Amino acid sequence: MPLPPPPVRPDPDHLPSEAELRRDLAAAYRLIALFGMTDLVFTHLSVRVPGPPGDTSHRFLVNPYGLLFEEITASSLVLVDAAGEPAQPTAWPVNPAGFVIHSALHLGSPGAQCVMHTHTLAGMAVAAQAGGLLPLNQISAEFHERVAIHDYEGVAAEDNPGERERLVRDMGDRPCMILRHHGLLTTGRTVAEAFYWMYYLEQACRIQLAAQASGAPLVIPPEPVVRRARDQVEEGPLRGWLPWQALRRKLDREQPDYAT
């Protein structure tokens, strides 16, 4: 197989079209399924769709309720408003209650153009630990002081509107969140960035559980070393774009229908 051409570093100020966002988000759904981070038809990934100049309405793409993540395609994604109600004709229902957390962060956190939420075994196990995510390795060091914590208030729903404000307050300017007794959440200025955070936050949780299960004493690096490791990783709006190109090529080869 010939090597693909090297990816061209994108313009960080590029404003993607709805069609581009549909393909990116559909790819993210397939990859979440591929890497074993789904919860049947539950949980959501969402992305903000920019409107025309001067348009102040809020529109987002989200999965139709009832499809497995491995079934999601670009065209099956549903355009919804800030309340999670469909803003386009659709034969499939959407789950407005499941969009509560997403809409709160989309509207309240400037960097949350894309929001991803999972209920994985590793993520929920770490979410039940008092110490949260520990800087036990190079991967988890990248999350040092970048993971917010939100205490459990029951299933997020419209009958608890104050939780929206608390979610945004707890998130602050951090890109990732552990929802106590619930799961993991990441945000990004792009789908690629949010997926990067989610993939590695999940890996950090899996590594932590494996280390704890060994029964051996845990060794945590000194604080200055953890901070240095965190700061050595590239920041900026293009975080995650390089592995994202490779993952998209994988899907183009193995699951090309995601883009339809």
Image: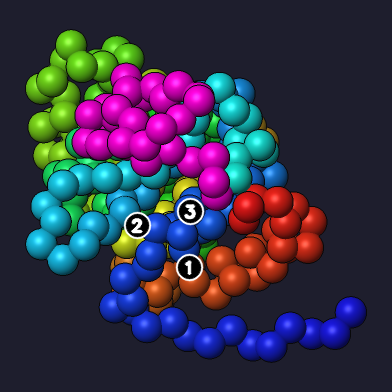
From the image, give the main secondary structure of the stretch colored magenta. loop
Name the element at disc 1. loop
| Mark closer to the observer (3, 2) | 3
Q: CA distance from mark 3 to mark 2?
A: 16 Å
Q: Which residues are magenta?
A: 74-101
Name the element at disc 2. strand
150 w.r.t. 211: above or below: above
Q: Amino acid at mark 2?
A: Gly
Q: Amino acid at mark 3?
A: Arg
Of residues 94 and 224, the one drawn nearer to the viewer in this rendering: 94
Where is mark 3, residue-wise?
22
Asked whether the beta carbons under mark 1 and mark 2 sit within 8 Å of each other, the answer is: yes
The residue that appears at 16% across and 39% down in the rendered structure is: 168
The residue that appears at 26% across and 58% down in the rendered structure is: 50
Q: Amino acid at mark 1?
A: Gly
Of labels 3 and 2, earlier in sequence is: 3
Q: Position of residue 192 (x, y in %)?
A: 47, 62
Residue 125 seen anywhere in this rendered image of the structure = no
Q: Is residue 88 magenta?
A: yes
161 w.r.t. 28: above or below: above
Residue that extends furthest to the right in the rendered view of this protein = 1
Q: CA distance from mark 3 to mark 1?
A: 18 Å
Name the quadrant of the N terminus: bottom right
The residue that appears at 41% across and 32% down in the rendered structure is: 89
The label on residue 188 is 2
